[in-house]
Image (cartoon, grey):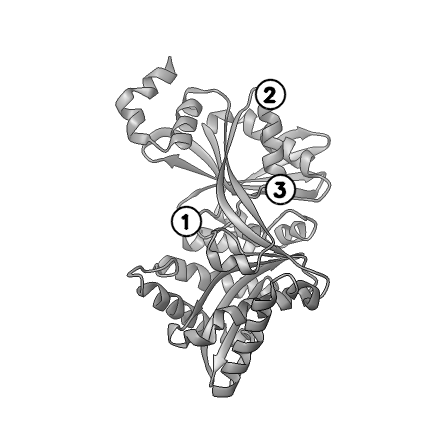
Amino acid sequence: MAAAGQDLSVRVVDKSEGFRNLRDAWNDLLMRSHSATPFQTWEWLWSWYTQIAPKRRLLILMVYHGETLIGIAPFERVGFHGLPVRRLRFMGGGPSDYLDGIYESGREEDVLSAVFGWVKENRSQWDILDLQHVRQDSPTLRHLELLGAESDWRVATRPQDVCPCALLGSDWQTTAARFGKKTRSNLAYYERLASREFNVEMREVRTEELESALGRLFELHAARWRKRLLPGVLGAGRTQRFHRTAAPLLAESGRLKFLGIRLNGEWQSLLYCLALGERTMYYIGGWNPEFRKYSLGTLLIGKAMKDAVDGGCVEFDFLRGDERYKERWTTEKRVSRRIIAHLGTPGGLLGSRAALTGNRAGYAAHGVWEKVQG
């Protein structure tokens, strides 16, 4: 434990047993945070750790006011492609579209001051902070930019991913009016077309169907990508194990919105969404290319957005990727950021230069390590 001032303390969790036992406290804090996303839930990060990164070195910083948990910075400690550089990163890299900490609303600055105060005091354990896929409205981004302007921290940020987003109206009629006449007409047309030829069910996947529906999602997603001679992001075994672990946990906590269309009793389109607070997020989908003329993907997106409106959401986030189909649904585009921060140490200078240029071989060839050492 390290003192943090203002009656705050920072406690470190760096073992899997400690992480496993945090679920209740973690989720209680999530309910008091307006900035967290589903990718910061315990269910998502525990599944990531156990199925994708079980050998990673955890450094979870828990910020307390007295005995009340008010913030979590879920870091991991990793190397940097063979360079003598130690990085602190947010946990969840790979399957997560947004990475960040969790901060009680109204206490963000207190928590971040405690977190980065602890990080600075323990600079012997790291060389650079490499914080990727941070939302443009994140308290973490704002705090580090201020540190870079006002202190001995050296901070650089770069745009990373375009994330299209739809702001939702108070009801479905208001929201749908923003799509344009053609999109509204298509939703009605494709539903009528499919209903004339099939027994159509468009609904959420039930708990008892979850395992089989996930398997079907993997099949449908792979079928679409095979036409491009590519495996798709759900093709890897560990990725599938991750989702088979995460989905039941997320469903149990009410944060999974898994929708599908069944034609004559068989899933032909599935859409895997995540939800937290007033946000729903389109994570990934799959549909049978043999039924292209019914535009099942379009129907499911419309269904997911309507459900989000009916559930009181104010935002439907299409996450990273500026694909053309998103334009018909979205009202704005946000850009996530990559933050590189260090304290001017030799390892920090080398790591930041490598991170910002992406040219590891060039540094080795030009002797930069020797240069920054002296």
Total numbered circles: 3
Residue under label 2: 151
Q: What x and y, as percent, mark residue 275?
A: 60, 59
Which amino acid, mark 1? Ala
Examine the rendered structure and indicate whether residue 49 appears above or below residue 193. above
**What residue is pinned by disc 1?**
53
Q: CA distance from mark 1 to mark 2?
A: 34 Å
Amino acid identity at mark 3: Asp
Q: Nearer the viewer, residue 172 or 267?
A: 172
Q: Nearer the viewer, mark 3 or mark 1?
A: 3
Image position of 127 (left or right of 333)? left
Q: Earlier in the sequence, mark 1 or mark 2?
A: 1
Q: Nearer the viewer, mark 1 or mark 2?
A: 2
Q: Earlier in the sequence, mark 3 or mark 1?
A: 1
Give the residue displayed 62% in from the left and 48% down from the top.
36
Q: Residues within 10 Å of mark 2 (few under 14, many from 20)?
A: few
155 or 320: which is nearer to us?
320
Q: Residue at x 41, y 37 (%)?
A: 78
Kindly report which numbered mark, 3 or 2, lies closer to the viewer in this rendering: 3
How many neighbours does mark 3 have within 10 angstroms: few (below 14), some (14-19), or many (20 or more)?
few
Give me the disc on residue 137.
Answer: 3
Rounded to the nearest angstrom, the CA distance separating label 3 from label 1 is: 28 Å
- Label 3: state its secondary structure: loop
